[in-house]
Structures are given as structure tokens and as C-alpha cells.
Amino acid sequence: MPPPSKIDQLPEDVRAELESRLVANGFAGYVQLSEWLAEQGYEIGKSAIGERGKQLKRKLATITASTEAARLIARAAPDDADERSGAIISLIQTEIFESLLSLEEATEEDDPAKRVEILGKAAKNIATLTRASVARNKWNMEVRAKVEAAAAAVDQIVNNGGLTAEAAATLRAKILGIAA
């Protein structure tokens, strides 16, 4: 594994400012950024800064593309019932489970400390996914309860003579269609 770059070794605040300046400069002006770092007491060449600029630009492009894709999907295929989140959580849970099985099958020759580290990360991810799944299910139950309460309110209005049975049926179908 290669040693960490000089930029990775910068204090967090200096690295954050460098990355902020890279973005603000449109991923240009590496000589000036190298000079700025020298003023801060860090000797880092323009090539290293240029490489960090390329990495950062790729990350930002990926995030931008993912965000735009999510917006397009949300517009083209609304997911009011949050089915995609459930599917994603399920896929990730399956992937983690398969990774744990593979880890169990690893030989004793593997580094035990590495195994413990992997298990620790997996446990943390499983806990996070479980919380997300529980929160999603709780939200889904709350929405369903509210929808059913609204449908019951429509029935009550009908019983009190405020709506025709046909209008109530249409309204009830629309309300219940939210959680279907």
C-alpha cells in the first residue's frame, strides 16, 4: 500500500480550505495553491495538488450525477410508499450477510486482527441498516394509521349525512390509495 499523500497528512482545516479553494478556482491555479500552502508552512507541489483536484472533481461529478439520477427517478417513478428504500436496505443486508459467510469460510491463516476489524465494520453497518429498516417500518405504520384514520373520518362524515355514499367511496379510495 502506498504511503499517504502529503495532502492527506495536512491538518483537517488546511486540507478542507485547500479543497474549497480547488472548487472555487474551478480546479485550476495549482501554482497559486502551492504558494498558498507554502505560506501556511507546507511544501506541496502543483502536481500533487493537481492530482487531488482530479480526484475531487471526479468525486463531485459522481455525486452530482447520482443526485441528478435520483431526481430523475423520483420524477419519473414516484415512490410514495418508499419501496426503493426497502429494496436497497434488503440488498445491502444480503450483501453484508454474504460477506460474513465468506469471512467465516476464510482459513485460519488469515490475519485474526483483520478479521476482527472486518467483523467490527460489518457489525456497525448491520446496526445502521437495522435502525434504518426499523425507522422505515415505523414510518410506514404511522402513515398507514393516519390514512386509515382519514378513511374512517370519511365514513363518519357519511354516517352523519355530510357526504353521499358515492362521494365518500371515491374519497375513501383516493385516501387509501396513498398507502396501497
Image: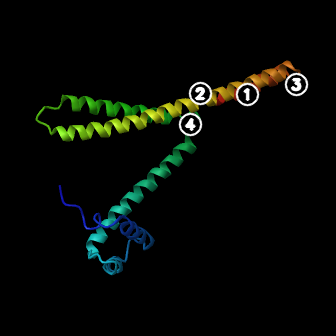
Query: Which circle's residue, 4 or 2, is located before the other in the chain?
Result: 4
> Where residue 48 sits in the image (x, y, percent)?
27, 70
Q: CA distance from mark 3 to mark 4?
A: 33 Å
Q: Secondary structure at mark 3?
A: loop
Q: Secondary structure at mark 2?
A: helix
Q: CA distance from mark 4 to mark 2?
A: 16 Å
Q: Amino acid at mark 1?
A: Ala
147 over 44 or under it: above or below: above
Q: Amino acid at mark 4?
A: Asp
Q: 84 or 69, which lies in front? A: 84
Query: Which circle's residue, 3 or 4, is located before the other in the chain?
Result: 4
Residue 150 tag number? 1
Which residue corresponds to mark 3? 162
Q: CA distance from mark 2 to mark 1?
A: 14 Å
- For label 2, the crowd category at 10 Å Cα-Cα, with few meaning under 14, some 14 to 19 and many 20 or more, is few
Which residue corresponds to mark 4? 79
Q: Is the N terminus in the top left, top right, bottom left or bottom right quadrant?
A: bottom left
Residue 141 tag number? 2
> Mark 2 or 3, which is nearer the eye?
2
Q: Quadrant of residue 58?
A: bottom left
Q: Secondary structure at mark 1?
A: helix
Query: Which circle's residue, 4 or 1, is located before the other in the chain?
Result: 4
Q: Secondary structure at mark 4?
A: loop
Query: Which circle's residue, 2 or 3, is located before the other in the chain?
Result: 2
Residues at circles 2 and 3 in contact by the CB criterion of under 8 Å: no
Q: 161 or 128, which lies in front? A: 128
Q: Amino acid at mark 3?
A: Gly
Q: Is the C terminus in the top left, top right, bottom left or bottom right quadrant?
A: top right
> Where residue 132 sits in the image (x, y, percent)?
47, 36
> Mark 4 or 2, which is nearer the eye?
2
Q: CA distance from mark 4 to mark 1?
A: 21 Å
> Where residue 47 sits in the image (x, y, percent)?
26, 73
